Image (cartoon, rainbow, N blue to C red):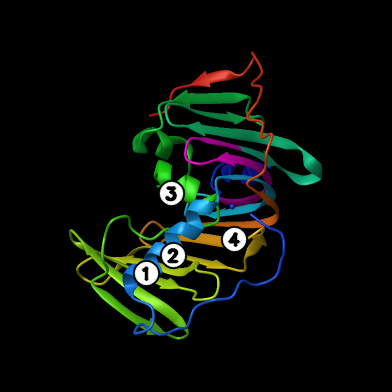
Amino acid sequence: MQRVVAVSLVFLLASCAPRREGIALDTDKTSAAALTTMTRQEDAKVRTLDGRGSISFESPEMSGSAAFTITVRKPDSLLVRLEGPFGIRVGLFFLSRDRFVMYNSMQNTVATGSPTSGTLRSVIPVDLTYEQIFDVFTGSIPLPDHEAPSQYTTDEGLFLLRYHASSLTSSYWLDPDELLVRRFQMTDPSGAVVLEGSSSGSIDQDGMRIARRLSLTMPREGRRVSVAFSRADINADDLSFDYTVPPSARRINPQ
């Protein structure tokens, strides 16, 4: 059961519908500016999510998997409830702009704090930023904001956009049908991969879409997180972010 608790925090969604009509895989007909604008507009349509799925985690120290239910209101409210075998509740994670709560029901402990990179890293077994957590649980790998790619071409049926920032190079392979990033890779000056991600499948609902499965890998650390959605309601109404932590829970301080 501790293997399930180890997963205790990393995140995504599901449902089916007809495919949208894509755009021609032609960089002459579709400029990089037009492509990135359309993709960001599609991402921005997704404002809330209410769903269910599974999450798995691998690291040198431990690995495990768990079912979850999730409620998200971008960009400032997220509640993940984790379940073990036979529907046993194993914990919850709440995240907002100014606060996070991580409750482990197996150990009856609760950690709270401000969601800085350091405190989040102390309770989540992967190095994800506040924004990346929301991205993962809303089924997307977003393109960089307010930046023009240094390279724009096509590769194996996908648009390829490459960005240089500081000493890192980020590459995004974009699906012309769903306007979803299907592959992402960040490399250092030596060409070594620092972070990579992938997505597959999609959930389409009322003209909106998210990826059905998404994974992030940190090769240097030997860590990987994968999320798959079995059900998702995009832009659901009447969301609830209520949760309860037993008064008997032992308080621990994030490092």
Are the two marked residues, 1 and 3, in contact with CB atoms closer than 8 angstroms? no
Are the two marked residues, 1 and 2, in contact with CB atoms closer than 8 angstroms? yes
First in sequence: mark 1 or mark 3?
1
Residue type at the position of mark 2: Met
Residue type at the position of mark 3: Gln
Are the two marked residues, 2 and 3, in contact with CB atoms closer than 8 angstroms? no
Region in magenta: 63-79
The x, y position of residue 236, in whole percent, is 67, 43
Camera-near label (1 vs 3) is 1
Camera-near label (4 vs 3) is 4
Q: Which residue is mark 3?
A: 132
Q: Residue drawn 21% across and 70% down?
A: 190
Camera-near label (1 vs 4) is 1
Q: In what element is the residue under mark 2?
A: helix
First in sequence: mark 4 or mark 2?
2
The front one of 63 and 38 is: 38
Q: In what element is the residue under mark 1?
A: helix
The x, y position of residue 132, in whole percent, is 43, 49
The x, y position of residue 228, in whole percent, is 63, 58
Q: Residues within 10 Å of mark 1 (few under 14, many from 20)?
A: few
Q: In what element is the residue under mark 3?
A: helix
Q: CA distance from mark 1 to mark 2?
A: 6 Å
First in sequence: mark 1 or mark 4?
1
Q: Quadrant of the N terminus?
A: top right
Q: Residues within 10 Å of mark 4 (few under 14, many from 20)?
A: many
Residue type at the position of mark 1: Ala
The front one of 191 and 170 is: 170
Q: Which residue is mark 2?
A: 38
